[in-house]
Image: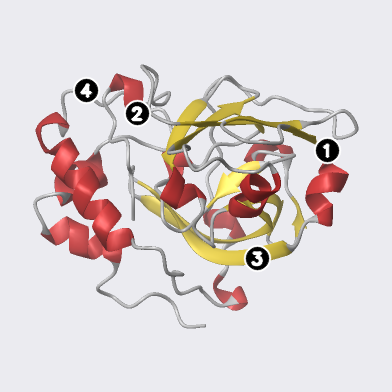
């Protein structure tokens, strides 16, 4: 398919009052922006981004547009190495069937590929082909409760994220186990990481070990969001 048109969701946001904190606040790497930046516009920003994001698929890029060298590697607290044989993804909280999924169980679910632009607010981007299971399929397998509104995401490097449920259920939001047609490298989050074209890079947790469905956001919203970064971080 052709790449997204020039006037994308992100550009539309950049032209509106919500665009400032979406483009500046936060980061995929460690950048130390002040928590005060964008605070005044954040609630309106989140509402507008959610409205513009919608639920439909984002146009994908062509395989020949993938640029493996453009994806920069960074981590919050070093690079954890998880034993694939003993790995288990915990799915708990507001679900009727809490799960402990190994990689074989994840691989038995329908597999999908998304060729997307990974966008970092520090000023770089990369077109990447991610493959894996839809997060929506995993949550459905666990018996998602109608009381659920958000998903808390834990990672082996102690990184923490929270997502709105609509974004988690988006058809292009993956729990990726492969990148650019090869097994996911450890440096990029193996054995399991989040990938989606609808969120900025700092929302795409690597080395994911746990998902917890909750009704409301708690005190913790995210590793960088708790320091003032925009929570919704939509594209």
* Element at label 1: loop
> Which residue reaches farthest top?
219
Disc 3 is placed on an element classified as strand
Report the mark closest to the observer, 4 or 3: 3
Tag 4 near tag 1, CB within 8 Å: no
| Count of marks, rendered view | 4
Residue 5 on image: x %, y %: 33, 78
Q: Residue at x 43, y 31 (%)?
A: 215
Q: CA distance from mark 1 to mark 2?
A: 34 Å
Query: What is the secondary structure assignment of the residue under circle 2?
Result: loop
Q: Sequence-wise, which precedes: disc 1 or disc 2?
A: 2
Between discs 1 and 3, the one toward the N terminus: 1
Q: Is residue 137 left or right of residue 40?
A: right
Which one is in front in this view, the residue at disc 2 or the one at disc 3?
Answer: 3
Residue highlighted by disc 3: 113
CA gap between label 4 and label 3 equals 36 Å
Q: Position of residue 179 (x, y in %)?
A: 68, 55
Q: Which residue is mark 2?
A: 31
Q: Which circle's residue, 4 or 3, is located before the other in the chain?
A: 4
Looking at the image, do the residues carrying marks 4 and 3 touch, with CB atoms under 8 Å apart?
A: no
Residue at x 53% of width, y 24% of height: 159
Q: How is the structure coloured here?
A: secondary structure
Query: For the residues carrying marks 1 and 3, which lies nearer the camera in this image?
Result: 1
Mark drawn on residue 102: 1
Residue highlighted by disc 4: 34
Q: Residue at x 44, y 36 (%)?
A: 150
**Nearer-the-camera pick, 144 or 84:** 144
């Amino acid at each position: 398919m052709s790449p997204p048109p020039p006037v994308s969701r992100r550009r539309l946001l950049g032209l509106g009052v919500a665009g400032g904190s979406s483009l500046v606040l936060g980061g995929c790497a460690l950048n130390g922006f002040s928590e005060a930046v964008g605070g005044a516009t954040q609630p309106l920003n989140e509402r507008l981004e959610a409205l513009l994001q919608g639920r439909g698929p984002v146009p994908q890029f062509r395989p020949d547009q993938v640029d493996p060298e453009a994806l920069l590697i960074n981590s919050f607290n070093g690079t954890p190495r998880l034993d694939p044989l003993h790995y288990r993804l915990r799915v708990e909280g507001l679900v009727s069937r809490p799960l402990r999924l190994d990689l074989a169980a994840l691989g038995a679910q329908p597999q999908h590929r998304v060729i997307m632009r990974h966008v970092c607010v520090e000023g770089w981007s990369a077109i990447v082909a991610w493959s894996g299971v839809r997060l929506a399929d995993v949550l459905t397998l666990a018996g998602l409760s109608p009381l659920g509104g958000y998903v808390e995401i834990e990672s082996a490097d102690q990184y923490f994220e929270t997502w709105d449920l609509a974004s988690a259920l988006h058809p292009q939001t993956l729990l990726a186990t492969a990148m650019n047609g090869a097994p996911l490298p450890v440096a990029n989050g193996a054995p399991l990481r989040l990938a989606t074209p609808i969120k900025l890079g700092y929302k795409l947790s690597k080395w994911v070990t746990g998902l917890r469905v909750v009704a409301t956001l708690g005190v913790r919203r995210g590793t960088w969001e708790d320091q003032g970064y925009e929570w919704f971080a939509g594209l």
